Every structure is written in C-alpha cells, then in structure tokens.
Amino acid sequence: MTSTPDTVDIEVLLQPRAAVAEGPVWDERTRRLIWVDIMNNAVHSFEPSSGQDSSVDVGQPVGAAVLRANGGLALAVRDGFALLDADFTNFRMVAQVEVDLPNNRMNDGKCDPLGRFWAGTMQFSPTSAAGALYRLDPDLRVTRVVGDIMLSNGLDWSPDQRTMYYIDSMSQGIDTFDFDPDSGEISNRQRLISIPKDVGLPDGMTVDADGYLWVALHGSGTVRRFAPDGQVDRIIRLPVSHVTCPAFGGPDYSELYITSMTYGLEERIRNEPLAGSLFRCRPGVRGKAPFRFAG
C-alpha cells in the first residue's frame, strides 16, 4: 500500500503488467470486477476477496465489457459488438461495425439507463478523425450516433439521466449532450471541460452518486474529480503515469478501482514497476451500480 499527497491510500490489487487494462465494471451479483486488457484480447474477472483473477482470450482486441441483464457480458471488440456467456464461453459476434475500416477498432463503452450499449471506435494509431460513437440497442440494431471522432473514450450519465458526458481524448476535453433516456437520442453537444495537454490526456470516466465526474488523465498519473460545473474538486495521484479508467465497486460502491497500461510505453515506464497494475482506493464518496445491457 502506498500513500499519495491527497491522503488517499492506494492499494495494489493485481500486477499483471497489462498491455492496456481498461473498462473496469463491478458485478454486484458475483462481487467480482470485470476488466479488459485490450491489446491482449482478454476479458478478466477479478475477485477482490481472494485476489483470484481469471481471463479468456476472445481472439481480437476488446475495448469494453458490460454486464448483461440476463447474465454474461456484452463486448465491444475490434470487429463490432459481441456476447459472452457468464462462464466466459460461447463468444459470438452479434453486430459488425466498420468492417470497411480495417485499421479501426472499438474502444471504451457503457450502457445507458435503459440498457442500450454505447461504444466508440478509433484507429489503432489515431492520426485522423476516422472514429465514431455507436449505440447497440437491445434488439441488436446498431446506430452510428456521432462521427468525426479521433479517439472515442470515456462516457457516462448524470444521476438524473438527462446529461451524457463524453470524451474524444484527442480533443483534450469532456463534452456534454442533452440525453433523452426514453429514446436514447442525444443533442446539443457542448464543451464542459478543456484539459491542457500538460495535465494529461482524458481517458476513462465514471460519474459518482453525487454527479461528480472522475476522469483518468493518461500520462499524468492522476484521476481527477470534477464538479458538474467543470471545476476540479479533487486529485488522486497514483504510482504510475499512464492510468486509463476509474470505476466504483465493492458492496456499497465506496471503492474506486483504477486500471493502467504498459503498451507502447516501454521507454517511458522503465522506472515504473507497477505499470499495468490494477489499483483500489476509498475516496470517501460512493459511485452507482452500472447499467446492464438489456439485449
């Protein structure tokens, strides 16, 4: 365990030297944390009580995993959307995305309050705005919702479900959309927070029960908590520079799990033995249960 200047103890739960650990999501039914290692094609299931971690190779990069209402997972993988049974078997594609763009892959994603799965795309090495944000409805119909995205990343919803927060990392900011929870339509995109490059690249994000945004700032070794008006409320510092995504979990959602990465950073992280680890802290606030895919 190590302490930060912000007086929050950071626990090192797992040291897999993950290539790109991402997308942690707490499964309250099994009391396990689901997370992915994108470039190792792996979906993981971690049990904090025992320290046991298991994984499955799904055969292609996997950007996000979400819980399904009826058990198992829905995945955003390189080729589109897929399903995986609760025992991590029977991987099957259910909707292809951007098959005409072989240099693209799917990245971060989450489910909205009515169980629709949102996930975006990016180039493997982002150099242009060739990505987009997609929505997978429970009937497995795919809708391209936002285009001209360079690196589609974190997203979440306000507690009243009327605002969707969204990150296109290369734009160095966090945007808001007006969100209609009934139809799943979004409108009125606006910039909420602009983040200077020397503060880090905005990556994964989660919204807590009070409506504050927790954002991993890639390259800075920090997770920042922003108020709904965009003001910085708190900074948590980790012992690695390239943090990727925060998510609340635990029995009362008072534990903040944070992933990190090593991929492509060998020279930069030579002196970071904990790079690619899974971390946990208890910041004194609570998150909320993740929404599940209704398909």
Image: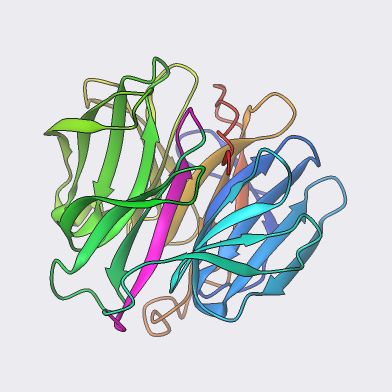
Is 107 drawn above or below residue 224 in the view shown?
A: below
Q: Please give left or right for residue 128 compared with residue 275 in the image.
A: left
Indicate the quadrant containing the C terminus: top left, top right, bottom left or bottom right.
top right
Instruction: Decide if residue 275 is in sight here.
Output: no
Report x, y in % for residue 245.
46, 51
Image quadrant where residue 44 sits = bottom right
Query: 66 or 256: which is nearer to us?
Result: 66
Q: Residue at x 61, y 57 (%)?
A: 35
Q: Please give left or right for residue 139 compared with residue 267 in the image.
A: right
Image quadrant where residue 224 sits = top left
Image quadrant where residue 286 sits = top right
Report x, y in % for residue 99.
34, 77
Query: 19 or 189: which is nearer to us?
Result: 189
| Colouring chosen for the image of the structure | rainbow
Q: Give the range drawn in magenta.
A: 101-114
Instruction: Decide if residue 97 is in sight here.
Output: yes
Report x, y in % for residue 152.
29, 57
Q: Residue at x 38, y 29 (%)?
A: 157
Report x, y in % for residue 150.
19, 63
Query: 293 or 244: which is nearer to us?
Result: 293
Please tell me whether residue 105 belongs to the stretch shown in magenta: yes
Query: 149 or 16: which is nearer to us?
Result: 149
Q: Residue at x 63, y 27 (%)?
A: 254
Is 110 drawn above or below residue 266 in the view shown?
A: above
